[in-house]
Every structure is written in C-alpha cells, then in structure tokens.
Image (cartoon, grey):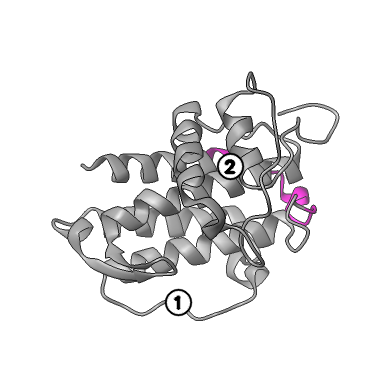
Amino acid sequence: MSENLRTYTKALYALDSVVRRVDDDDWDNQSPNEDWSAKETLGHVIWGVRRMANALRDQGPPAEQAEADVAGQQPAKTWSEALDDVMEALDQRGVLSKSVTTPFGEMTIDDAIGIFYSDALTHAWDIAKAAGIEPAIPEDLARKSVVMLSAAGDAIRGPGMMRDAIEVSETASDADKFIAMTGRKPSQPEGSALR
C-alpha cells in the first residue's frame, strides 16, 4: 500500500466518522460553505468519490447532478455505498499506476489521491460544523495538508475553489491551521455541545 493510499483511506474514514454521527434532522443545516447545506456538501464529496471509482475502472465520470440529488434521501447510506465502492475499486493490483485526467492535469491515481484526500478532510469539517459535532480531523493529515496547500500557493484560490487563507496563531492545532488554509475560520462547531 502506498503512502498516498494510506492517507486517502484515512481521510475518507475520518469523513465517515463524521457522517455516521450526523442526526437525520441536521442534513439540511447550512454548512460553512455558503453555497451548500451539510447534505449538499456530502453530495459533492460522494460525486468525487464516485468519479474516482469510475476512473479506477476506466469509466467516464458520473452524470452531473445537483449535490442534494447525489446525496439522496438517505445521505449517510448513499455515502456508505460510495465509500465501499471506491475502496473495492482501489483494491485491485496495479490501479495506483493508472493515469487519470484531473483538474490539475494528467497524473497517476496514486498522485491524484495524494491531493484529493484534503477535500474529504475539508468537507468533514464543514459537515461537522453544520451538525454541531466534533470533526476529529487527524492531526497528521492536517499537518500534511498544510504543507501541500502551502506549496500549491494561489493555484488553489479563486471562484469555485478555496478562499484566501485566514491567519491563525502559531500555537493553533494542526487541524485549525489546515482549516484556516482552506479559507475557513476555525472555531468550535455551533450548537449547545459537541457530540
């Protein structure tokens, strides 16, 4: 197993740990991304995971749909099925060396998952914030993401991408530094208490 595959898998299961704790009534809550609810945020990630699974199987991208439609009536179930599917697709000899076209150009699956894991972490935080639960972003992945995002510079900023980074204290946790790099203000999720 490659380091990138370990990282990608760990990030997807960090998101999974959030999704499993979201109450059914909280899926329509507004996320920190003003364009999406928690459900729409998850739909965005599900579509990306399905796209990865399709690329692994030499298939085209899934049909374009509104994010809420991708997540469906049972977002947690839809997510669980997409997660199982991409894990099955990744569990094939030689898939990591396949070439795939990404928004960042042509690269191997191994290189692509070494970038796209940060999307799952970012949106795990968004969904947790919307639902008022602890995102539990692994500090090692947060540290790795800060390095990667710093190296990308302005290439990740702009409409449809990340907002400008927010300054945080040098003593902030790695998770808070990562979230700030994505243009989000790190803070305790709203609600009376973390679950």
Residue that badge 2 annotates = 20
Magenta residues, as a range? 17-30
> Where is the N terminus found, in terms of image quarters?
top left
Q: Position of residue 148 (x, y in %)?
A: 44, 44
Q: Is residue 54 above or below residue 127?
A: below
Q: Tell me the amino acid under the disc marked 2.
A: Arg
Q: Position of residue 17 (x, y in %)?
A: 54, 38
Q: Is residue 75 above or below residue 102?
A: above
The CA span between labels 1 and 2 is 24 Å
Q: Is residue 21 visible?
A: no
Residue that badge 1 annotates = 62
The crowding category of the residue bearing disc 1, from other C-alpha atoms within 10 Å (few below 14, some 14 to 19, many at least 20), is some
Image quadrant in which you'd find residue 59:
bottom left
Q: Residue at x 31, y 40 (%)?
A: 6
Viewer-nearest of discs 1 and 2: 1
Question: Is residue 111 found inside the magenta-colored segment of the image?
Answer: no
Relative side of 9 to 134, left or right: left
Relative side of 149 to 163, left or right: left
Q: Tell me the amino acid under the disc marked 1.
A: Pro
Question: Is residue 26 found inside the magenta-colored segment of the image?
Answer: yes
